[in-house]
Image (cartoon, rainbow, N blue to C red):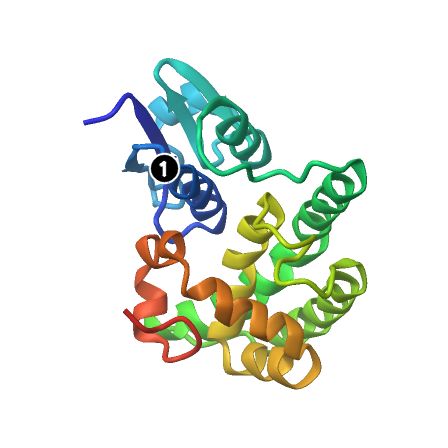
Amino acid sequence: MTDNILYGLERSVYTRIARLALEEKGVPYTLQEVEIFGPEGVPPEHLQRQPFGRIPVLDAGGFMLYETSAITRYVDEAFAGRLLQPHTPQQRARMNQVIGLLDAYGYRPMVWDVFVQRVRIPLQGGVADEDRVAHGLRDAAKCLQALEDVVTPEPYLVGDMLSLADLHAYPMLRYLALAPEGQALLQAQHPRLWAWLEMMSQRASVQRTRGRFEQVCPTTGSQG
């Protein structure tokens, strides 16, 4: 048992972002699942931690913190280990731009419109809303192009070192790539982002946080 508890869901993109930061820093933690989408709604005890009922929430030895970007920056600055934020103002600004771009323009089309409709709903016996898939793919394509326009040609998104931008982007692009159309979009139009996704999929932190959907969908990063 550790003093650090992360409240969230294994399948949640934002929970995984926080977990990747904890894993990369080597911070011991316990993931406590909180089902916020159940028929009973958000559990009352979770609303005491997060008044808007969102996940994740970090309890770092009694220091309670919500909002994923706040959590990842705190983890980077409060704990020893590899630095996850670049040194130069330009690279830090680019990191923040990538994170903001994904939150504002990438998350909903990539995850809710493409992944949920094309992958999660059918796996649960439902039928995808094809209009939502098509709309999501259009918006995802625009976001991917915007992302490619601002990232560097170096191994990672904002330079030669892993940063919070990579940890923020991976879970979203990974879910997009689980949909056949998302994988085709990345491979055909964004080969550099596809190569980055494959490289990231081999990191120990990524392997340790793989969820059940990745284990049943045979695309990049499904090894191990």
Residue 132, given in percent of the width and then of the height, sits at 62, 71
The three-letter amino acid code for the residue at tag 1 is Gly
Residue beneath the point at 57% across and 31% down: 73
Residue at which label 1 appears? 26
The picture quadrant where one finds residue 219 is: bottom left
Placement of 148 over or under 73, stated as above or below:
below
Residue beneath the point at 43% across and 24% down: 47
Badge 1: residue crowd in 10 Å (few <14, some 14–19, many ≥20)? some
In the picture, the quarter occupied by the N terminus is top left
**Residue found at the far left of this picture:** 1
Residue 75, given in percent of the width and then of the height, sits at 48, 29
Task: Classify residue 179 as left or right of residue 60.
Answer: right
Task: Classify residue 116 as left or right of residue 9.
Answer: right
For the residue pair 169 and 198, the one nearer the viewer reads as: 198
The picture quadrant where one finds residue 136 is: bottom right
Task: Classify residue 113 as left or right of residue 38.
Answer: right
Residue 161, given in percent of the width and then of the height, sits at 60, 50
In this orientation, does residue 175 appear?
Answer: no
The picture quadrant where one finds residue 176 is: bottom right
Disc 1, SS: loop
In the picture, the quarter occupied by the C terminus is bottom left
Residue beneath the point at 59% across and 46% down: 163
